[in-house]
């Protein structure tokens, strides 16, 4: 990354539940044999935004008169 003043944040544009039956396994210590039947998946669609302040870099690279 070139710029030192970068900040990352996420913008959620969509959130919904998808209803479907599926089987998953939960952990019990080191044992992965606990089978669980689930009926929905929570879905979140996000954009990864990177906001950068370019003003100080522009001032440093601006030609002097």
Image (cartoon, helix red, strand yellow):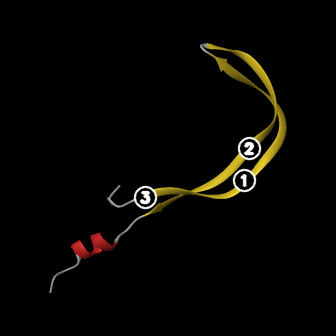
Query: Where's residue 20, x and y in %?
Result: 84, 38
Q: Is residue 51 left or right of 54 when viewed as pictured?
A: right
Residue ranking furthest to the left = 65
Residue 10 relative to residue 31: left or right: left
Q: Residue at x 66, y 53 (%)?
A: 45
Residue lying at the far bottom in this picture: please name it.
Answer: 65
Query: Mark 1 = which residue?
Result: 15
| Label 1 secondary element | strand
Picture layout, residue 34 above or below residue 18: above
Snapshot quadrant of residue 2: bottom left
| Left or right side of 12 for 57 | left
Quadrant for the N terminus in the image: bottom left
Q: Position of residue 59 (x, y in %)?
A: 25, 76
N-term mark: 3 or 2: 3
Pointers 1 and 2 in contact (CB under 8 A)? yes
Mark 3 surroundings within 10 Å by alpha-carbon count, few (fewer than 14), some (14 through 19), many (20 or more): few
Q: Position of residue 44 (x, y in %)?
A: 68, 50
Q: Which residue is mark 2?
A: 42
Looking at the rendered structure, which numbered label has been put on residue 7?
Answer: 3
Q: Mark 3 and mark 1 in contact? Answer it, CB < 8 Å.
A: no
Q: Residues within 10 Å of mark 1 (few under 14, many from 20)?
A: few
- Label 1 to label 2, Cα distance in Å? 8 Å
- Residue 9 x, y percent position in the rendering: 51, 56
Q: Is residue 50 above or below residue 19?
A: below
Q: Residue at x 69, y 22 (%)?
A: 26
The residues bearing labels 3 and 2 have C-alpha atoms spaced at a distance of 27 Å
Q: Secondary structure at mark 2?
A: strand
């Amino acid at each position: 990354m070139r710029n030192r003043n970068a900040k990352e944040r996420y913008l959620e544009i969509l959130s919904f539940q998808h209803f479907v039956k599926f089987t998953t396994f939960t952990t019990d210590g080191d044992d992965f044999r606990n089978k669980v039947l689930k009926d929905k998946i929570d879905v979140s669609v996000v954009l990864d935004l990177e906001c950068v302040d370019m003003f100080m870099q522009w001032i440093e690279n601006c030609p002097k008169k």
